Image: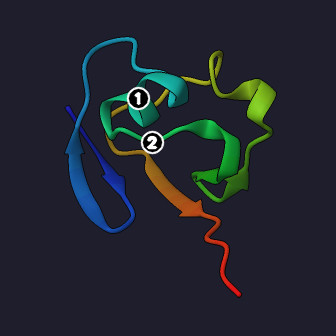
Amino acid sequence: MMAMVNGSEWPLEEGTTVSRLLAAMGLQPGMIVVELNGRVLRRSEFSACGVAGGDRVEIVRFVGGG
């Protein structure tokens, strides 16, 4: 099954959570905002919130500069 992640198809395994998706992408949750099907998630929801085929996920990383 596939989900749309930042506009690109991403393969999912059965039982994938937002935390597992981020880990598979090599991303740390500390400086990330995740929107799942139009709803912004709290970091505390990442490990319990499942991602299913056809879901739309938007991931935004904060980048510092100066």
Q: Quadrant of residue 44?
A: top right
Name above or below for residue 64 compared with residue 34: below
Name above or below for residue 62 compared with residue 50: below
Q: How far, Cα to Cα, is label 2 from label 1?
A: 6 Å
Where disc 2 sits, the SS reads loop
> Which of the labelled discs sits on residue 37, or is there none?
none
x and y percentages locating residue 43 in the rendered image: 75, 34
State left or right for residue 28 relative to residue 38: left
Contact between labelled residues 1 and 2, with CB atoms less than 8 Å apart = yes
Q: Amino acid at mark 1?
A: Ala
Residue extending furthest toward the top: 15
Q: Which residue is mark 2?
A: 27
Q: Amino acid at mark 2?
A: Leu
Instruction: Judge the density around disc 1: few (<14), some (14-19), many (≥20) Cα neighbours within 10 Å.
Output: few
Where disc 1 sits, the SS reads helix
Q: Residue at x 23, y 46 (%)?
A: 10
State left or right for residue 21 relative to residue 13: right
Q: Which residue is mark 1?
A: 23
Name above or below for residue 52 compared with residue 14: below
